[in-house]
Image (tube, rainbow, N blue to C red):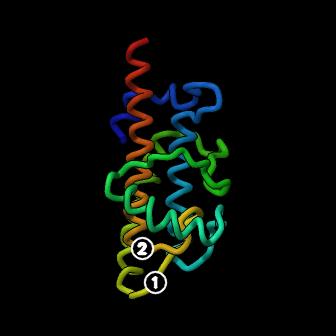
């Protein structure tokens, strides 16, 4: 991801690729906020407001989540929960990348600790209560999803 962001260039981090689309900096801020929320959940502090009812969350957790984790792909376009929508408050792509790397390492460590506590679950806005290793699988797919977006953006700008 770092190489892709560097290819896009620091100056392009502020420019929106299309109407209603996030800039590179906003996308990175969204990822940082996602990992911050994951750390809150792993610490036992509920930070994710449920976006769907219990029945739908159960169905999504049983049917869609395994698909997402296995394929490392998010097949539907769900709106990001408002808690992790970029605010534009953080716009330095280099700093955001460094922070994202640090947070990702922390999340993995905390998820491993939580995994050792059998039966421990964290809350996800769309899937409801999930196991810590499912959280890591989802975060991996989520990161791949946005990395592909950055790569396509990088490729489209190279053809201008």
Say which quadrant the N terminus sits in: top left
Q: Are marks 2 and 1 in contact (CB under 8 Å)?
A: yes
Indicate the quadrant where residue 159 lies: top left
Quick one: SS at disc 1? loop
Say which quadrant the C terminus sits in: top left
| Residue underneath mark 1 | 120
Residue at 38% x, 32% y is 151
Residue at 54% x, 38% y is 25
Q: As drawn, is 61 to the left or to the right of 137?
A: right
Q: As drawn, is 6 to the left or to the right of 60?
A: left
| Residue underneath mark 2 | 132
**In the image as oriented, which residue stretches furthest toward the bottom?**
118
Would you place residue 33 above or below residue 124 in this image? Answer: above
**In the image as oriented, which residue stretches furthest toward the top?**
160
The residue carrying pointer 2 sits among few (fewer than 14), some (14 to 19) or many (20 or more) residues within 10 Å by Cα, namely many
The residue lying toward the viewer, choosing from 157 and 88, is: 157
Pick whichever of labels 2 and 1 is earlier in the sequence: 1
Q: Is residue 106 visible?
A: no
Indicate the quadrant where residue 33 lies: bottom right
Would you place residue 157 above or below residue 2 in this image? Answer: above
Residue 87 in percent (x, y) is at 67, 45
Quick one: SS at disc 2? helix
Residue at 58% x, 25% y is 18
Q: As drawn, is 28 to the left or to the right of 83?
A: left
Residue 52 in percent (x, y) is at 64, 63
The residue lying toward the viewer, choosing from 6 and 45, is: 45
The residue lying toward the viewer, choosing from 64 and 115, is: 64
Residue at 42% x, 60% y is 138
Residue 116 in percent (x, y) is at 35, 85
Would you place residue 76 above or below residue 107 in this image? Answer: above
Label for residue 23? none
Would you place residue 49 above or below residue 81 in this image? Answer: below
């Amino acid at each position: 991801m770092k190489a892709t962001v560097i290819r896009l260039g620091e100056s392009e981090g502020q420019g929106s690729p299309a109407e209603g689309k996030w800039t590179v900096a906003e996308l990175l801020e969204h990822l940082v906020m996602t990992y911050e929320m994951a750390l809150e959940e792993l610490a036992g502090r509920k930070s994710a407001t449920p976006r769907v009812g219990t029945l739908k969350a159960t169905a999504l957790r049983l049917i869609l989540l395994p698909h997402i984790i296995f394929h490392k792909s998010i097949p539907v376009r769900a709106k990001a929960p408002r808690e992790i929508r970029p605010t534009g408050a953080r716009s330095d792509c280099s700093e955001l990348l460094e922070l994202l790397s640090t947070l990702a390492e922390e999340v993995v460590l905390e998820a491993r600790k939580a995994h050792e506590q059998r039966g421990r679950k964290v809350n996800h806005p769309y899937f409801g209560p999930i196991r810590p290793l499912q959280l890591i699988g989802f975060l991996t797919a989520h990161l791949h999803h946005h990395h592909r977006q950055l790569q396509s953006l990088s490729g489209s700008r190279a053809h201008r």
